[in-house]
């Protein structure tokens, strides 16, 4: 008999829908670390991130019957967590609840100048690829935390969690066009900041392709 840990997301979702809570617990174990990382990057606070993680799984369980494709559980859960994280940020700012489109300033992207890195090293790998390398993870996470919120969120969802442009747009309540623009700016900002840290030694930190 196949154990829960080896079942696909789709199988576990169907079992959970049928009332098997142990199947949902397996999904929690499978995704809790990734949802924590996502929440922490967005809210930048441990206790708030923990609340987001808990609320994300509770929301997912409550609305599990609405998920038609169980194999999309991971992406769906990340979208839920992203929305909850932005609610936390809205409350933190003591602002009236408003649309995420307004919060993130959709329609004003043209007012933000595109970064022009002054000292970009001749890297063989892009910042988003470098993010996967354990020896630089801590430094890059710190640099990511310094990016403006709207750029950090798009970068994390697209390049780290690997949601599609459409899924990212739905999670953040912005257009797909804005997702693409913000991702470009986030990558440029990140590349410039990392080049200032690593300088001419940056290529030596990267494995050859």
Image: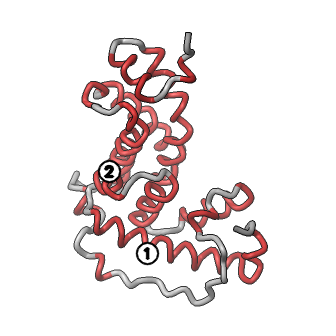
Judged from the image, the secondary structure of the residue bearing numbered disc 2 is helix
> Relative to the observer, which residue lies in front, 126 or 178?
126
> Relative to the observer, which residue lies in front, 88 or 27?
27
Q: Sort mark 2 into few (<14), some (14-19) or many (20+) by Cα contacts within 10 Å.
A: many
Q: Is residue 71 above or below residue 13?
A: below
Q: Is residue 201 above or below residue 76?
A: below
Instruction: Give residue 64's position: percent from left, percent from top.
Output: 31, 27
Q: In this view, does 80 lie above or below 169?
A: above
Residue 110 as seen in the image, left or right of residue 202: left
Residue 184 as seen in the image, left or right of residue 127: left
Residue that carries the numbered disc 1 in the rendered image: 185
Residue that carries the numbered disc 2 in the rendered image: 171
Instruction: Give residue 105's position: percent from left, percent from top.
Output: 27, 68
Instruction: Give residue 153's position: percent from left, percent from top.
Output: 43, 59
Residue at image coords 74%, 83%: 200
Judged from the image, the secondary structure of the residue bearing numbered disc 1 is helix
Looking at this view, name the residue that lies furthest to the top: 1
Precedes in sequence: disc 2 or disc 1: 2
Residue at image coords 43%, 15%: 21
Q: Sort mark 1 into few (<14), some (14-19) or many (20+) by Cα contacts within 10 Å.
A: many
Query: How far is mark 2 from mark 1, CA to CA?
Result: 19 Å
Residue at image coords 34%, 65%: 179
Instruction: Give residue 1's position: percent from left, percent from top.
Output: 56, 9
In the picture, the quarter occupied by the C terminus is bottom right
Q: How many labels does the image show?
A: 2
* Mark number, residue 41: none
Residue 79 as seen in the image, left or right of residue 132: left
Residue 173, quarter of picture: bottom left
Q: In this view, does 12 lie above or below 68?
A: above
Looking at this view, name the residue that lies furthest to the bottom: 118
Residue at image coords 28%, 52%: 170
């Amino acid at each position: 008999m196949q154990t829960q840990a080896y079942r696909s997301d789709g199988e576990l979702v169907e079992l959970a829908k049928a009332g098997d809570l142990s199947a949902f617990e397996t999904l929690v174990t499978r995704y809790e670390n990734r949802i924590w990382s996502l929440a922490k990057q967005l809210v930048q606070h441990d206790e708030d991130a923990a609340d987001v993680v808990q609320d994300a799984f509770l929301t997912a369980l409550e609305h599990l019957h609405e998920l038609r494709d169980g194999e999309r559980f991971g992406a769906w859960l990340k979208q839920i967590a992203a929305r909850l994280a932005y609610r936390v940020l809205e409350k933190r700012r003591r602002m009236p609840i408003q649309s995420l489109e307004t919060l993130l300033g959709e329609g004003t992207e043209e007012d933000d100048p595109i970064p022009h890195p002054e000292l970009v090293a001749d890297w063989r790998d892009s910042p988003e690829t470098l993010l996967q390398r354990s020896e630089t993870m801590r430094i890059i996470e710190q640099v990511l935390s310094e990016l403006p919120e709207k750029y950090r969120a798009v970068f994390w969802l697209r390049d780290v969690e690997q949601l599609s442009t459409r899924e990212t747009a739905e999670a953040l309540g912005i257009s797909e066009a804005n997702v693409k623009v913000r991702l470009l700016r986030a990558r440029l900002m990140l590349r410039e900041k990392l080049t200032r840290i690593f300088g001419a030694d940056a290529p030596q930190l990267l494995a050859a392709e």
